[in-house]
Image (tube, grey):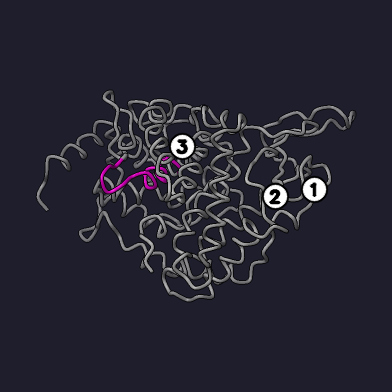
């Protein structure tokens, strides 16, 4: 393929933004490398293995996991900050936060159940997309009805009681992050709508739930505090709000507003001219959080890009943008040992996994080396604790259009 002005500029930007000695350690793409790999073929066995496991997974909405000290109803999500600990000498004293080993007595059953559901539904949906086997769609639909439709078991569409530090009764902005996995559940729904298992009335009910959740995200003071941060909490808010807004096909104004927010404030608040996430580099786990944040923002880009406008190219004049941050992170994904900042306090050697951001960026910027590295990296986190920081597990659903 002949070199165009666009590809020349893209390559030059990557060289300028990335230290030369880091780039020299990245292997060149194979002769058959492409910027648009066949995700269905690459992930085929992985998808079916996860979906077959999910076929027998129990359906466990919040109402099956009561919490005696939750201030809400059995339908309300409740969790406690896992880095907070009680004062053994004074049971009534406020819990104190201690970074490091999580408190095994913190109530996390709702968080874990939501994560399990949000892993099962996209896997089942992706398997249905591959095979058209209604077994997968039927089981995914059963999860969705239990969690979001059935009056007896559905979850209240808010996170007002997430990440509580007892004896407080209200949640914290950090709790919004716990539901980031709902974004891929929302992405799954249009695919399931093409099946025989999900009726139109179910689609309407799901759209109503996610629209209500979007309303809470955009009107709640607690959610607003998460939105206004300059780190992965804000990215989590944005990914969830975008996925919810995209389901509402009758009103495109919320999605338009989120697109403008990404271009006008998110890039400036989170990305420096050299392609770093400065607010992630000061955390105890800067490598993991940088990858986590990049995946979420890449997911946002996929959801708000249209045939007429791509936000992947929304670079600010002085450099910050998705192009620069992907170029910055690429060599550190190819070789974790080149990471020039402090190592993560937890699980540093277990990283990286296969980040969807590399695949999405490969397609957006026509960079086959990104896609080649995505293909070679481990497909899933090997440590269960890291699953919470893996917001997009089925990229097939993000790069494919639903078809009847």
Disc 3 vs disc 2: which is toward the camera?
2
Rate crowding at label 2 as few (under 14), some (14 to 19) or many (20 or more) other CA atoms within 10 Å: many
Mark 3, Cα crowd under 10 Å, few <14 / some 14-19 / many 20+, is many
Q: Secondary structure at mark 1?
A: loop
Mark 3–mark 2 contact, CB under 8 Å? no
Residue 181 lies, in percent from the top left, at 55, 49
Instruction: Kindly check if marks 1 and 2 are in contact, taking CB atoms under 8 A apart as contact.
Output: yes
**Camera-side residue: 118 or 357?**
118
Judging depth in this view, the residue of 10 and 152 nearest the camera is: 152
N-term-proximal mark, 3 vs 2: 2
Asked whether, in this view, residue 260 is left or right of residue 47, the answer is left
Mark 1 crowdedness (10 Å alpha carbons): few <14, some 14-19, many ≥20: many
What residue would you read off at disc 3? 290
Q: Which residues are magenta?
A: 296-310
Quadrant showing the C terminus: bottom left
Q: Residue at x 43, y 26 (%)?
A: 269
Question: What whole-number distance in Å separates the C-alpha atoms at marks 1 and 2?
Answer: 9 Å
The kind of secondary structure element at disc 3 is helix
Q: Is residue 73 left or right of residue 396?
A: right
Which mark, residue 110?
2
Earlier residue among tags 1 and 2: 1
Disc nearer the start of the sequence (3/1): 1
Report which residue position mark 1 lands on: 67
Query: On the rendered structure, is 139 left or right of 314?
Result: right
């Amino acid at each position: 393929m002949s070199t165009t002005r666009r590809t020349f500029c893209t390559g030059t930007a990557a060289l300028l933004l990335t230290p030369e000695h880091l780039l020299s350690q990245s292997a060149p793409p194979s002769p058959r490398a492409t910027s648009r790999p066949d995700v269905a073929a690459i992930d085929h066995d992985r998808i079916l293995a996860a979906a077959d496991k999910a076929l027998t997974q129990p359906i466990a909405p919040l109402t099956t996991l009561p919490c005696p000290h939750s201030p809400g109803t059995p339908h309300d999500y409740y969790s406690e900050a896992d880095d907070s600990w009680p004062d053994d000498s004074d049971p009534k004293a406020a819990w104190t936060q201690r970074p490091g080993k999580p408190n095994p007595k913190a109530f996390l059953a709702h968080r874990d159940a939501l994560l399990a559901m949000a892993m099962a539904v996209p896997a089942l949906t992706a398997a249905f997309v591959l095979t058209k086997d209604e077994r997968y769609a039927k089981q995914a639909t059963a999860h969705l009805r239990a969690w979001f439709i059935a009056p007896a078991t559905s979850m209240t569409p808010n996170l007002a009681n997430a990440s509580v530090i007892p004896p407080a009764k209200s949640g914290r902005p950090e709790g919004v992050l716990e539901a980031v996995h709902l974004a891929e559940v929302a992405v799954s729904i249009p695919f399931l709508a093409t099946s025989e298992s999900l009726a139109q009335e179910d689609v309407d009910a799901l759209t109503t739930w996610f629209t209500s959740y979007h309303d809470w995200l955009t009107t709640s003071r607690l959610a607003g505090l998460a939105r206004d941060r300059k780190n992965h909490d804000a990215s989590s808010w944005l990914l969830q709000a975008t996925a919810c807004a995209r389901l509402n096909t009758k009103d495109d104004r919320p999605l338009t507003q989120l697109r403008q927010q990404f271009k006008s404030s998110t890039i400036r608040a989170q990305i420096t001219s050299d392609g770093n996430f400065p607010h992630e580099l000061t955390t105890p786990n800067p490598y993991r959080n940088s990858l986590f944040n990049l995946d979420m923002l890449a997911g946002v880009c996929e959801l708000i890009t249209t045939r007429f406008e791509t936000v992947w190219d929304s670079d600010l004049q002085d450099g910050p943008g998705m192009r620069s941050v992907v170029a910055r992170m690429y060599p550190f994904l190819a070789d974790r040992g080149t990471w020039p900042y402090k190592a993560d306090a937890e699980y540093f050697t277990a990283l990286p996994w296969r980040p969807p951001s590399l695949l999405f960026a490969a397609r957006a910027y026509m960079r086959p080396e990104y896609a080649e590295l995505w293909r070679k990296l481990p497909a899933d986190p090997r440590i269960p604790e890291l699953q919470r920081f893996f917001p997009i597990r089925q990229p097939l659903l993000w790069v494919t259009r639903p078809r009847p």
